[in-house]
């Protein structure tokens, strides 16, 4: 039980780092090239969604492990 | 500030108060009257491995007794599907029940036949089915499979499986002073939110199905009206409802379909638009905390599985030779690497893409609902289930702003998740139909 919760937490740390990087870099890019804001934003959301997918797979696996034991 | 702003603020506060009350009243009485009854040990003797099961919580009689408020159980109960929709107090919106058990055939009726009262517990059985907390269960005992019997109360028993170190909860319906064990609730999600494989099939129009039909009606009405307005007003500036819908449609066309799919985008527009408005409509209706809304449809994994399977089928069947070549036997890569690493990963990726698509929608919407329900539960946790008035007031003061904040955030999430769903669908379709570049 406690280990699965730990696994879910670690997945969230990974996703947080990844999405933080994306957000920060996107802000920088917008500051450099404000005219490309629309393109940068949609690509940022897309990439964040992909990272979130990896984190969600981890969390669901943790959930399954918990349910199976 | 003028009077108009004050009126707006006033209605906002009234609405938020109503929202909290509507969320709170439906489980305000959960803590008392989880009735139980004394049952003989014979019930659990029927289980296969008796000596590994230890009773931890043995529910006594049908008397009222105090039970601790459990925020987790409460949240799961509110996000899961149900056979009847709770409106207010003891009033239920009844829905059709279509049940099939291989041993005794079809049972067709409505949830009104169970005479639900307090908590959505049915007063009587119907062909061996009972209604507990608004959901249909089946009595395991075959002698109860016909006719109408009077249910005194429902009771739970918690057992500890010492081998697996796991708690098992058994439910009983007490009929004529004797407990009858109930089967688990039927679920399509493989028991992910409780329940599991059962001896009967539930084809009922449940709360989620009802909400989906309602959403389809609303969307149908909306789009037929807008399409008529667009046809009649050709060449004129759009107004009203048409404006709102056209903004979203052109957004999906210009920002989602065209850049991701390319020049073949028109073929996939019907699917992308339907998926977008269906998911958006369900997300928004799920945000309404009282009667016609409140169902957690896009947070139900079976709904998102079907949506993801549709995207998977569309992208797989429209994939061209170029896509399959680059997935299965990519040029310019050593054969060993292809056979051992890249091709297996690509094949796994084919299925992982729709899998993350379904999980993302399911997890985001479910998580949002659970957070809102947890904030509402603060009232009952701090108020000690109605025993402490001061704690209850403190709970309300903490809960109302937090719930409002979460609901505002959830409005953003409703749009964002609908957008991400079609955006990723378009990306997958775009990858499948992409023409080779010749440099």
Image (spheres, grey):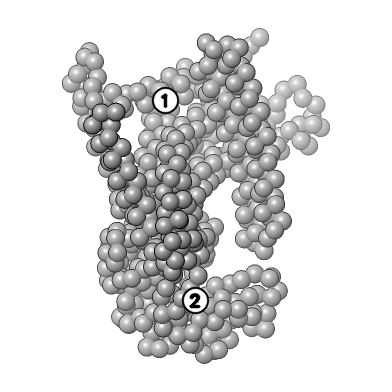
Local SS, label 1: helix
Q: Is residue B81 visible?
A: no
- N-term-proximal mark, 2 vs 1: 2
Could you classify mark 1 by the number of other residues whose Cα lies within 10 Å: few (under 14), some (14-19), or many (20 or more)? Answer: many
Which chain is home to disc 2?
B
Out of B381 and B102, give the one closest to the viewer: B381
Residue B413: image location, x then y, percent: 47, 37
Q: Residue at (50%, 70%) from the top-left corner? A: B68
Q: Nearer the viewer, mark 2 or mark 1?
A: 2
Please indicate whether residue B62 sits to the left or right of residue B260 in the image.
Answer: left
Which chain is home to disc 1?
B
Contact? badges 2 and 1 (CB < 8 Å): no
Quadrant of the snapshot with the N terminus of chain B: top left
- Asked if labels 2 and 1 share a chain, the reply is yes
Q: Residue at (64%, 22%) from the top-left corner? A: A25
Local SS, label 2: strand
Q: Residue at (69%, 75%) from the top-left corner? A: B162
Could you classify mark 2 by the number of other residues whose Cα lies within 10 Å: few (under 14), some (14-19), or many (20 or more)? Answer: many
Out of B327 and B127, give the one closest to the viewer: B127
Please indicate whether residue A34 sits to the left or right of residue B208 in the image.
Answer: right
Q: Quadrant of residue B26?
A: bottom left
Quadrant of the snapshot with the C terminus of chain B: top right
Q: Is residue B226 above or below residue B358?
A: above
Estimate the spatial distance between the alpha carbons at disc 2 and disc 1, rounded to whole Å: 50 Å
Question: Residue B252, labelled with which disc?
Answer: 1
Residue B245: image location, x then y, percent: 31, 27
Query: Looking at this rendering, what residue extends furthest in the left direction?
Result: B232
Residue A32: image location, x then y, percent: 61, 12
Residue indicated by mark 2: B156
Residue B294: image location, x then y, percent: 37, 51
């Amino acid at each position: 039980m406690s280990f699965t919760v730990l696994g879910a937490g670690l997945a969230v740390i990974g996703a947080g780092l990844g999405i933080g990087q994306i957000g920060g870099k996107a802000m920088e890019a917008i500051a450099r090239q404000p005219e490309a804001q629309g393109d940068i934003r949609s690509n940022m959301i897309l990439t964040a969604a992909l990272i979130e997918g990896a984190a969600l797979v981890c969390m669901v696996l943790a959930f399954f492990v918990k349910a199976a034991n | 500030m003028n009077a108009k702003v004050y009126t707006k603020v006033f209605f906002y506060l009234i609405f938020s108060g109503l929202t909290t009350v509507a969320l709170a009243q439906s489980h305000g009485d959960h803590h008392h009257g989880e009735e139980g009854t004394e049952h003989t040990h014979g019930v659990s003797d029927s289980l296969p491995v008796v000596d590994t099961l230890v009773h931890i919580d043995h529910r006594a009689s049908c008397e009222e007794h105090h039970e601790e408020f459990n925020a987790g159980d409460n949240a799961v109960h509110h996000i899961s599907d149900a056979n009847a929709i709770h409106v207010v107090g003891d009033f239920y919106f009844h829905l059709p029940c279509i049940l099939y058990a291989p041993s005794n055939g079809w049972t067709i009726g409505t949830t009104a036949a169970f005479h639900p009262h307090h908590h959505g517990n049915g007063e009587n059985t119907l062909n061996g089915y009972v209604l507990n907390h608004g959901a249909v269960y089946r009595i395991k005992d075959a002698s109860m499979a016909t006719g109408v019997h009077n249910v005194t109360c429902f009771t739970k028993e918690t057992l500890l499986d010492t081998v697996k170190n796991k708690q098992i909860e058994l439910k009983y319906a007490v009929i004529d002073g004797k407990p009858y064990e109930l089967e688990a609730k039927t679920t399509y999600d493989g028991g992910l939110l409780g329940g599991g494989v059962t001896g009967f099939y539930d084809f009922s129009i449940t709360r989620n199905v009802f909400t989906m039909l309602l959403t389809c009606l609303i969307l149908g009405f909306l789009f037929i009206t807008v399409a008529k307005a667009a046809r009649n007003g050709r060449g004129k500036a759009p107004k009203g409802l048409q404006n709102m819908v056209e903004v979203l449609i052109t957004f999906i066309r210009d920002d989602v379909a065209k850049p991701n799919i390319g020049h073949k985008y028109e073929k996939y527009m019907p699917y992308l638009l339907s998926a977008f408005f269906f998911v958006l409509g369900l997300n928004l209706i799920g945000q309404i905390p009282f009667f016609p809304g409140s169902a957690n449809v896009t947070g139900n994994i079976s709904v998102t599985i079907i949506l993801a399977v549709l995207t998977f089928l569309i992208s797989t069947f429209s994939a061209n030779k170029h896509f399959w070549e680059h997935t299965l036997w990519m040029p310019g890569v050593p054969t060993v690497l292809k056979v051992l690493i890249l091709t297996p990963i690509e094949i796994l990726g084919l299925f992982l893409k729709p899998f993350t698509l379904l999980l993302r929608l399911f997890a985001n919407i479910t998580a949002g609902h659970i957070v809102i329900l947890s904030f509402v539960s603060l009232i009952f946790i701090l108020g000690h289930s109605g025993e402490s008035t001061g704690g209850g007031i403190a709970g309300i003061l903490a809960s109302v702003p937090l719930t409002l904040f979460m609901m505002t955030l959830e409005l953003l999430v409703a749009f964002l998740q609908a957008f991400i769903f079609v955006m990723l669908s378009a990306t997958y379709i775009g990858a499948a139909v992409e023409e080779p570049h010749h440099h």
